[in-house]
Amino acid sequence: MSQLDSIFAITAIDGRYRSKVENLAHITSEFGLIKYRTEVECQWVLFLSDCEEIPEIPSLDKEDRAFVAAIAANFDAVGATRIKEIEATTNHDVKAVEYYLKEQFALRPNLQAINEWVHFGCTSEDINNTAYGLMVKAGVEDVLLVHMDQLIKVIDDLAQQYAELPMLSRTHGQTASPTTLGKEMKNVAARLYRQRQQLAAVEILAKFNGAVGNFNAHLSAYPDLPWADLSAQFIQRLGLVNNPWTTQIEPHDYLAEVFHCIMRFNQIVLDFDRDIWSYISINYFKQRKVEGETGSSTMPHKINPIDFENSEGNIGLANALLDHMASKLPVSRWQRDLSDSTVLRNIGSAFAHCGIAYQATLKGLSRLDVNPAAIAADLDDSWEVLAEPVQTVMRKYGMNEPYEQLKAVTRGRSLNAELFLEILEELKLPEAAQAELRDLRPETYIGIASELAKRDFE
């Protein structure tokens, strides 16, 4: 797409963000859907030609097989355009693919003789659901999981690098027991990794069983063939998982599983975006300036965290689409209604907004520098967080109402090192307890945060 074309694009995906989603263009576009339909139709002819139980379609020789396989493997814009031209007459997108293949088969005598085996026994949904299965499989494996893995790695690298950098926690927006920057990064990386693994494990289902899922037409022609087994073998050949119990459509439950996994991953990214945005605002991270860039049209000093905001916005759009598809697609009146057709065409839009979001978060992270001085200063201004270990040690030594005593002297107060030592004296702790607590500092009160940051996911 030229720059001139892109400025007339209706959606930002194919306009402003086209360069960021180019790797999805040949997978989830109209071209991609036509390509996968063509692949399924070609593979079905090849599969039938291998069935010795069907003598009416001869086994194809090496050259003819290569020709059929090449129609799908080398499918390009010329082929897709011709199919769209045929569709203008048929007003049926799958039938247009069938007629296109018959045109191609007419170029070779042996194939022309079997051209009525194209689309044999099939309803359009046999072609469509397998095509969408291939599309989703490629979109997830070749694009989304790649972005997800990059994001997880970058965040986990931060976890390793800053595993031992003490940092003040904030619960309810208030000072709380210290952690380390690396541990907080690890929390996110581990959450993302879990959802990534669940997404990769979702089975991509498909059906190839005729008009209402019972092989009615197949059995009318060949009543003695094990069509359920043959169908399962064919779907396995495509790299998908057979679903033997369907109506006219594969019921799309697996799509809901895919979309819900992605939504959960996205919500974690959104949570992370907002946290990083907040840490930037309190100077825990510095943003590197890029020469020539403008942060504000009126305030020259500004470097805005726009990448994290961009990610947040795109996640919102992605999850709105994914949520609608996940709730709508598994619902179909009786044996089939067509309301899923137009919804399925938006899979690419949802995946694209995900990809844009992940790349934006990665870009934002690449422009950050940790500010250890600000983090350390915040800790040193928050000695009140040591009220927790003091009252805990007091419990150990059997002192009366330790929580209440610490609450009385610390609640709502900001403490420094001197005040902390004064409070220890006022509490009249046993000498053993004093010894345990006297050298405690906010930056050393981090539990096993460093160890947790360095652990492997599994």
Image (cartoon, rainbow, N blue to C red):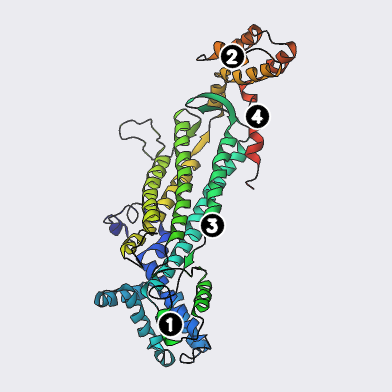
Per the image, the residue denoted by label 4 is 447
Asked if residue 352 is positioned above or below residue 176 in the image, the reply reads: below
Above or below for 98 versus 157: below
Alpha carbons under labels 1 and 4: distance apart: 67 Å
- Marks 1,4: beta carbons within 8 A: no
Label 2 vs label 3, nearer the camera? 2
User: From this viewpoint, which residue is outermost toward the right?
Assistant: 432
- Marks 2 and 3: CB-CB under 8 Å? no
Which numbered disc, 2 or 1, marks the residue that appears first in the sequence?
Answer: 1
Q: Amino acid at mark 4?
A: Gly
| Residue at mark 2 to residue at mark 3: CA–CA distance | 49 Å
Residue 73: percent from the left, percent from the top? 46, 75
Name the secondary structure under disc 3: helix
Q: Which residue is mark 2?
A: 406
Residue situated in front as seen by the camera: 36 or 49: 49
Q: Is residue 120 visible?
A: no
Number of on-image labels: 4
Q: Give SS at disc 2.
A: helix
